Image: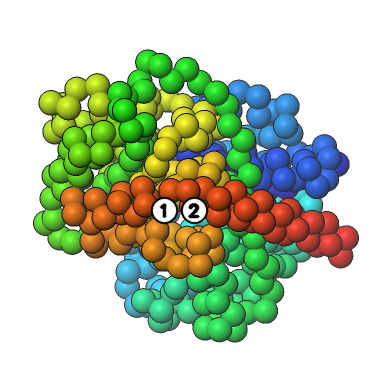
Amino acid sequence: MKRFYLSGQRTFGNRGCEAIVRSTVGLLREQFGEVEVLVPSTDIARDSAQWPDAAEGGVRFVPAYLPPQTRYWVNLQRLPLFKRAGWPFPLPHWLEAQLASVDAVLAVGGDNYSLDYRLPTPIMSVDKWAMDLGKPVVLWGASVGPFEREPAFVEPITRHLARMRFVATRESVSHDYLLHKLGLRNLVRMADPAFMLAKQPVDLAPFWPMGEGHVLGLNVSQLLERYGKAGHDVRGEVAGFIRHAVRERGLGVLLVPHANSLRGRVQDDDAQYMAALLDQVADLGGAVTMMPNDFNAVQTKYVISRLRFFIGARTHATIAALSSGVPTVSIAYSVKARGINHDLFGSEEPVLSSLDISAQALQRSLDWLVREEGTLRLLLYRRIEELQAQTRMATARLSEVLVH
């Protein structure tokens, strides 16, 4: 029986992280049969409750490596002197025992190897330790970089990535960057593992909005204010767009939270952020509602799959829609949305920049979805099968890694 460790994973608070883990476990079972997968967690009780039958699939939740000094070290790395430095703290004995027990480490998380969350050295440290122990490490279904905003970091991150058995990028923008900018050759293409995620039906009746033109799903979050124009009234613009969708298009609108905070911080909690938006359009009554915030990833994907259209900021909310054949516009705040959509559609027309959020821009996006609805559904049906086959091929490469 093969055993794997999923580094880069810490919590299912973001349904995208849960989607990656669930789908990766499914791919490993499909390739290797019975497996054991060690899934790090900062709240094992909470994550176990979110995936109650995880153990039946070979999943064992283990404590995540997140020492108290992480916060201070990440802040120190704002200083030029520390941008080259690796993680300076020793490998704990308990983590060494876990890493030593596995056949391979898959570095999951989607975008941990980027500057979206400052320098990723605490995450890199686990992968480095595993490689130092002689374990094969694979960066799995990721968007990577760019790192040029921190020039002193480019050389060490390039060396680190070159040590991996292979780097499986989930979209072409990252692949081209690693190949042509960093000169890496250990590259494999795959789709995001969440394109393989299953669905679990739930009762839609208690929260489904009214709308003669069916239902538009909408996911927005504090991310749009963080990466958008300073001082821009994002919620006000989105509220204006919702009024248009309901009154002019006859659509119901379902607000879809896809991440919730472990610490009560509104910037990490879609439901808290969108509750204020729901209040702004309360006069529209039952035409605008919000999905419950306690659904897990497979339940959330089922809800999204029942929508007519979807517009979302969270990457894995849009992946849930796209992989269900729902015509979708991605609100992009980083490289990942651009790359994923370019690979699916051959263009970035389905992408709306977080810098361009306005009622008018959102209306244009909805007009495009309505106009191209039939074409998009047919294209997604064909392309999703191709991406899933590509991901299975990448999983098969793991078999080659484990025999060397």
90 to the left or right of 303: right
Q: Residues within 10 Å of mark 2 (few under 14, many from 20)?
A: few
In the current view of this chain or complex, which residue is farthest to the right? 403
Q: Quadrant of residue 117?
A: bottom left
Q: Please, what is the three-letter code of the amino acid marked with disc 2?
A: Thr
At mark 1, the secondary structure is: loop
How many marks do you count on the picture? 2
Question: Residue placed at 19% from the left, 22% from the top?
Answer: 285
Q: Residue at x 48, y 52 (%)?
A: 376
| Disc 1 residue crowd, few under 14, some 14–19, many 20+, Cα 10 Å | few
Given contact means CB atoms under 8 Å apart, are the residues at marks 2 and 1 in contact?
A: yes
Identify the residue at horizontal 72%, vertical 45% (top origin): 27
Q: CA distance from mark 2 to mark 1?
A: 5 Å
Residue 375's disc is: 2
Identity, as a three-letter code, of the amino acid under mark 1: Glu
* Residue 16 location (% of width, % of height): 49, 44
Residue at point 16% right, 32% down? 281
Residue position marked by numbered label 1 in the rendering: 372
Q: Position of residue 186 (x, y in %)?
A: 69, 74
Choose between 155 and 168: the one closer to the eye.
168
- Compared with residue 207, is residue 81 higher up or lower down, i.e. above or below? below
